[in-house]
Amino acid sequence: MTDGVHGVHGTHGAGEAAEREWARHWRYAQLPGLDLLRAHYVRHTFPRHTHDGYVIAAVTGGIEEVGLPGGTLRAGPGSVVLINPEVPHTARAGVPEGWAYATLYPSRELIAEVAAEIGSLRGTPGFTADSVADPQTSYVITEVHRAAEEGNALAADTLLRGAVARMLTRHAGPLPARTVRSAGAVDAAAARAVLQERMARPPSLEQLAAELGTSPFALLRAFRETYGMPPHTWLTDARVRRARALLDAGTAPAEAAVAVGFTDQPHLNRHFTRIVGVPPGAYRRGRSGGRLPGGG
């Protein structure tokens, strides 16, 4: 693969299907507040995870199956998948040939800026649909990628804002505020805070429950109900998120692995690739125009 485009499984995969997989996850300096992912996945599956910002994904080939709290959706060419911040989800191929897509990951700040410009939304915007059939916007999203890859900042920014404004105008409303009411939800929030603070050396479920004055089973149930995943899954996702921030700041993958609590760099590589879609080394190169040496 060239120009920052990387095989996902490479020679480690199961033959021909793995060789057809490729992905580029990168950031274009002229589009602040946005990550870009263009990929074709066949065997790769994304475990349950969340994003700090939003997901706007144009499926361009095959079928993507997205597992959301409300059920599983199947998105094909011409579809745009919309996911709000902190919504747990999975993704995998829905057909043997996999799926291809062009994805925009706009930050909360970028979405808020566009929402303020169009002036039709109050509060924090949130998408009200998980997937929409919109071939026009799907095409525009692919053109954002094309313009960014060609270094055409004016076109990329214009197309990006147009696509985001269209999705917000047609498929968004105020994002509901998360309210903590039950005692279980309070315990879950406290547990999450402990895991966030002690990410590198977390307590066991039994220790965590004892610290909070509850039982392991009650805490597990409350955490799953509140955050859509059990504590260990949430912790892995949080570690990868923090590792991304460290890599963005220039930290080497081996150092980032230890800092967030993974055993070693291969341990980070495995979980990072599953959740982000590319290895840490490829991710770092996507932050620097493909100039960083070394793999991930």
Image (spheres, rainbow, N blue to C red):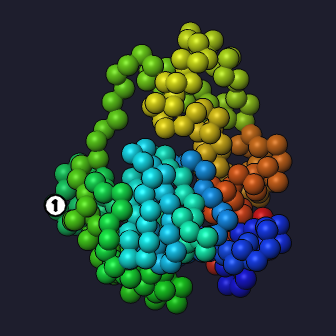
Residue 93 horizontal side relative to residue 13, left or right: left
Q: Quadrant of the N terminus?
A: bottom right
- Residue position marked by numbered label 1 in the rendering: 120
Residue 185 position in % (x across, y down): 43, 23
Residue 168 position in % (x across, y down): 26, 63
| Residue 262 occupies quadrant | top right
Q: Residue at x 60, y 32 (%)?
A: 231
* Depth order, front residue of 17/27: 17
Q: Residue at x 54, y 58 (%)?
A: 91
Residue 9 position in % (x across, y down): 75, 68
Q: Residue at x 19, y 56 (%)?
A: 121
* Depth order, front residue of 74/293: 74
* Depth order, front residue of 21/182: 21
Determine the residue located farthest toward the left in the rendered image. Answer: 120
Please tell me whether mark 1 sits on a helix, a strand or a loop: loop
| Residue 249 occupies quadrant | bottom right
Does 53 sit above or below residue 5? above
Amino acid type, mark 1: Ser
